[in-house]
Amino acid sequence: MGEADEAFVQALGHRPKLSITEDEGIPLIDLSPLSSPNGANTKHIDDLVVEIGNACKTWGFFQVINHGVPLEKRQKVEDAMRKFFAQPLEEKRKVRKDEKKAVGYYDNEHTKNVRDWKEVFDFVADKRILMAASHEPEDKEVPETFNQWPDYPPELRHKDAGALTVLAQDDVGGLEVKRKSDGEWVRVKPTPDAYIINVGDIIQVWSNDAYESVEHRVMVNSEKERFSIPFFFFPSHYTMVKPLDELTNEQNPAKYRAYSWGKFLTTRKGSNFKKLDVENVQIYHFRVQELADKLERALSINSK
Ligand SMILES: O=C(O)CCC(=O)C(=O)O
Ligand SMILES: [Fe+2]
């Protein structure tokens, strides 16, 4: 075997283990009360809300069935996706996405500064949107679009930066979630026609840490290619993200200061195409405690 490009190489502690833990415990939630033909039954809806709340607290991940999305729609998207990716590389590269072009094909994304072993096609479902040109406060907004589909798996552990993610994975499987109770990586069992939903960083901040954004990763295998279709649910770029007023009070003060979602995303995306030597922006950088510690360190350096 030839030498691997060092951009793909994971730090030792993040390489996969050889055995797989498949967890039956990731909640499977039946959404049929939402589309009940006799109108929604309040008791069932209340139970559903509790079930979803518990899943978000315990796992940060759950699968939904009887969600009302017609199977034919999913099959149509899957057919188009397979057809697109089956084309020769030079064809796919004709619709290439890069640092200036926000949508299209790419195969050189970096997550946490390590290159992913995947191919992606990002596309836009909606109108054009405005986005900050950079993280710098004086930079103007520029028109941009962002929506991701479909994703040929990222291999790296990460948390999703948006509010929540809805994901369709195929029957090959490979998505792994870091179990909150013991830090073990467990595999999300492929369930036909189910969608996987996970809490992202924004919900963690909005809920002032009541619901945590959980680390996950995708393990590739050399025998069978795998497809997945993630939908990242993001707020508008001008949204300032901060703990919700109704969830904070004197006993539970805001743990984060407000940050601009558009600027956060722009800074994040700056490292999507190259390996940087510094850690990319993370929500913990906006933690009030983290900022207080930094200030304390700075003051103690200055007084020496
Ligand atoms: O492909 C998957 O199963 C997960 C994809 C993912 O985690 C992501 O794109 O953020
Ligand atoms: Fe993800």
Image (cartoon, rainbow, N blue to C red):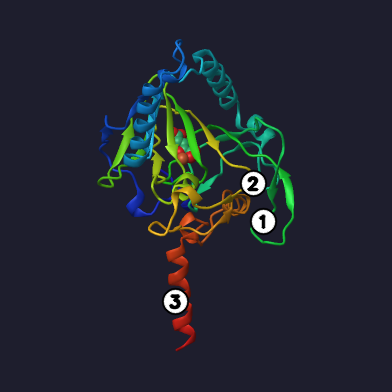
Tags 1 and 3 touching, CB below 8 Å: no
* Distance between the alpha carbons at the discs numbered 2 and 1: 12 Å
Q: Position of residue 194 (x, y in %)?
A: 41, 22
Q: Amino acid at mark 3?
A: Glu
Looking at the rendered image, the quarter that the N terminus falls into is top left
Tags 2 and 3 touching, CB below 8 Å: no
Among numbered discs 1 and 3, the one appearing first in the sequence: 1
Among numbered discs 2 and 3, the one appearing first in the sequence: 2
| Left or right for 236, reference 197 | right
Residue under the point 26% across and 36% down = 21
**Does the rendering let one see residue 89?**
yes
Residue under the point 49% across and 61% down = 285
Q: Position of residue 82 (x, y in %)?
A: 54, 22
* Distance between the alpha carbons at the discs numbered 1 and 3: 29 Å
Task: Please tell me whether residue 122 is drawn above or below residue 249 in the rendered image.
Answer: above
Residue under numbered circle 1: 134
Residue under numbered circle 3: 296
Please tell me which residue lies in front, 177 or 107.
Answer: 177
- Front of the two marks 2 and 1: 2
Please tell me which residue lies in front, 94 or 75.
Answer: 75
Residue 232 in which image quadrant: top right
Q: Amino acid at mark 1?
A: Ser
Residue under numbered circle 2: 237
* Distance between the alpha carbons at the discs numbered 2 and 3: 32 Å
Q: Count residues near mark 2 (Cα–Cα under 10 Å), then give few for <14, some for 14-19, many for 20+.
A: some
- Front of the two marks 1 and 3: 3
Residue under the point 63% across and 32% down = 123
Q: Position of residue 221 (x, y in %)?
A: 38, 33
Q: Position of residue 69 (x, y in %)?
A: 50, 18
Among numbered discs 2 and 1, the one appearing first in the sequence: 1
Circle 1 — which element?
loop
